[in-house]
Amino acid sequence: MTAASPKVARTELILGGQKSGKSRRAETLAQSWLKASRTHHAVLLATAQAGDDEMRQRIERHQADRAARLARLATVEEPLALAESILRHSRAETLVLVDCLTLWLTNQLMPAGPGPGASAAPEVAARAAALVDALAAAPGPVVLVSNEIGLGVIPLGTEVRGFVDALGQLNQAVAAVCERVTLMAAGLPMILKEPSWKRS
């Protein structure tokens, strides 16, 4: 396999900042999976919600771009019930791509309006635990995209600091159960964790 066409791990978490190449790597993995066999399928679980016109246009642009690059990638809008959706769509021959965990966590915390404080923490932790369980139980490969937002200055405001903490904890929990973890920077993958078959 070339660097542009990496071997698909059973589970992979792809981290990075905005426009770091996270989604493009995930799509490259999906493309590799689809090319490997005519019996292979791939489904994208999209977590974004169009809260305003700019976001709606951004989503539509991403949809059009993906359709041009990956015509065989099915898309399912899943802003909340991510663990259940992974288990519903995962098959031995189907790769599930989740893009992205950051927006999924935002969706968990925003509707009720409390922010990621003490009142929201138990429910968010339970959903994160269900997600981890779903990754372990999924019969097919799963690729997840998430932002690394903890490298900048300490944010002002309790809610923003709480969100940074919650996303960091979610990323750590998912990374612990994924076979491969990749950090993207300037479109380049840095492998943080490799599957055992790759190390041997």
Image (tube, grey):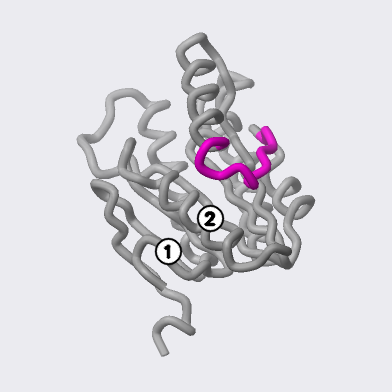
- Determine the image quadrant of residue 193: bottom left
Could you say which is closer to the camera, residue 55 or residue 106?
Answer: 55
Q: Position of residue 100 (x, y in %)?
A: 52, 41
Label 2 amino acid?
Gln
CA separation in Å, label 1 and label 2: 8 Å
Q: Is residue 170 above or below residue 50?
A: below
Secondary-structure class at tag 2: helix
- Determine the image quadrant of residue 198: bottom left
Query: Which residue is disc 2 drawn over?
Result: 31
Asked whether the viewer can see residue 95, the reply is yes
The magenta stretch spans which residues?
67-78
Query: Which residue is disc 1 drawn over?
Result: 5
**Mark before the other along the chain sequence, 1 or 2:** 1
Q: Position of residue 133 (x, y in %)?
A: 67, 60
Label 1 amino acid?
Ser
- Rate crowding at label 1 as few (under 14), some (14 to 19) or many (20 or more) other CA atoms within 10 Å: some
Q: Are marks 1 and 2 in contact (CB under 8 Å)?
A: yes
